[in-house]
Structure formats: C-alpha cells, structure tokens
Image (cartoon, rainbow, N blue to C red):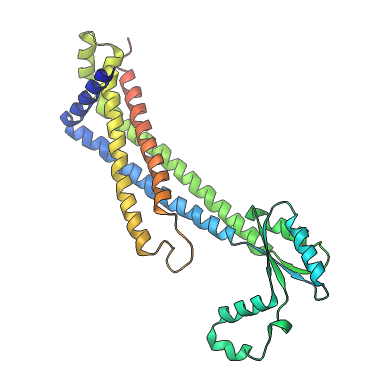
Amino acid sequence: MKIRLLRHFREGLKNLIRNGWMTFASLSAVGITLLILGVTLVIAMNAQQMSNYITGQLQINVFYKMTATPAEEKQIMAEIQSIPGVKSVQFVSKQQEFAQLKKSIGSQYNDVLSGLSASNTLPDKLIVKAVDPRQTVTLGTEIKTLPQVSKVQDGSEVANKLFRFLDVVRNIGLAFVVGLVVTAMFLISNTIKITIFSRRREIEIMRLVGATNWFIRWPFLTEGILIGAIGAAVPFLAIFFAYRMAYDRIGGAFLSIAFPLMPVAGLASKLALVLFGLGLFIGIWGGIMSVRRFLRV
C-alpha cells in the first residue's frame, strides 16, 4: 500500500511538472484567492480581538451613601460578590481615587489640587466586572437596589450602543468571510476541473488499457492535494511574515491606541488551519468531482 501511494505521489508530481501552464494557472487561482481570504481573516480576527478588549474594559462603578458605615460597606461588597455573573469586586478608597485623579490630569495641575484632600472630594467606591460583559447593564440594575448604595455607573447608554455596533460589525464580517470562502471554493475547484478536462484523452486511454477507476483517480487526487497545499503555503507564509513584521514594528498594539493586536503565534495557528484545510479540501474535492465524469460507464 505504501509503495502504491508513493507511486501515485510521484505520478501526480510528474503530471504537475508536465502540465506546466495549467499547473501555474491552478496554483495562481488557489494562491490569489486564499491570499485575499487570508488577509480578510487577519482583519476579522484582529477586529474580534479589539472588540473583546473593549468589552473587557466595561465595569460598574458603585458608590456608597455618605452615611454608610464600614460594616455596611463590607456587607454591600459581600452581597455584590454573591450575585451570579459577577467576576470581580474591587474596593477603591478615597485616597486611591485621589491619587489616580492627580496622575490622570498630569503634574501641571498639581497646584489646583494642592488645596484639596482626598477625604472631602471623592467617595469610596467599588469596581465591579461581569463574567459576561453583556451582563454589565443587568448587573448594574440589580446593584442599584441594594441598600446604602447612592449611585451606580454602569455605562448603559454607551454599552448598549457598543454591543449593537459590535454585533453589526461581526455579522457583516462573518457574511463577508463566508462569501469569500464560497467564492474560493468555486474558483479553485473550477480551475482544477479545467486542468483535468484538458487531459480527458489521457484518462480515456488509461481506461482502454484496463486501469481501474481508483488507479486513475489517485494521481489526480495527489495533484489536487499538492495544488491545495502549495497554493495555501505561499499566501500563508506571505501573510505570516508580513504580519510578524508589522506586529513587531508597532509593538503589538494598534497604532497609538492601546488596543492589543492578536499575538503572532495564535493568529498563525488559526490562519494555517483555515488556509491549509480549505486548500486541501478544495483540491481533493475538485479532483474527485472532475475525474468522476470521465469514469462513468
């Protein structure tokens, strides 16, 4: 069996070399189509990465009433931690808030804040994060009902608009990727079919001398596999090295914004799975479907 597979592989490789221009046409169709698809996937995966980062920054700011005692503050914190869907609860004291305020506005305004103190400017608060960022508004509504809670900032106005926008972007991106995949399958399989159609006389001669259907199929399946693999390898390597260079140059973040890009290793593994999987699938499928019509009795 091993010897037969090696023979079929050699025959398939010889046929690719022998039919140079048709092989070049097939590889070009596979490579260009998968290159476009790969670039689209890179953009889509980084868009998803950015959306996850943005939603991960959503938080609920919970402010105590001025009359709340330390014991009541601890009780409220414990009650919030017990609510299903709460990921974390962080206590921020007046002093911590005041220090963050001074840091955020810059040293040039230190004179303005020099006459103020943390004790009479800012209240204590809790920072609450949800396991599912989409539950942020729901959790904020529930926390508002707790006693000794004066105000809750859940960003409901921004969060709802953000989630609607991300849903639209995700759906458009998904539809675009699916459309490209279908287009890639159509273009590549048809190119392989044309390649095999141009050699229909060769198939007819093999049948006349008594070759079995699978004996005829295997070299063409091998050709399809090689075309799919090579056609996927070239755009994968081009995208991988270009992305790694861009990632290193901009420091792994999108321009001056603190949006982290998808790590090179994670992106490469997913991209390789899609491109090589699609290339091999289309190569094998195109080979099977194209040869079948010439093997009908």
Q: Quadrant of residue 195?
A: top left
Give the residue at x 69% y 77%.
94
Assign the N terminus to one quadrant of the image.
top left
Taking the image as shown, residue 257 lies to the left or right of residue 226, namely right
* Nearer the observer, 245 or 215: 245
Percent x, y of residue 30? 31, 38
Taking the image as shown, residue 55 lies to the left or right of residue 124, namely left
Q: Quadrant of residue 22?
A: top left
The residue most toward the front is: 71
Give the residue at x 24% y 25%.
9
Give the residue at x 73% y 57%.
81
* Nearer the observer, 204 or 92: 92
Percent x, y of residue 3? 24, 19
As drawn, 255 above or below 170: below
The residue most toward the left is: 18
Q: Quadrant of residue 107?
A: bottom right
As drawn, 70 above or below 265: below
Taking the image as shown, residue 166 lies to the left or right of residue 236, namely right
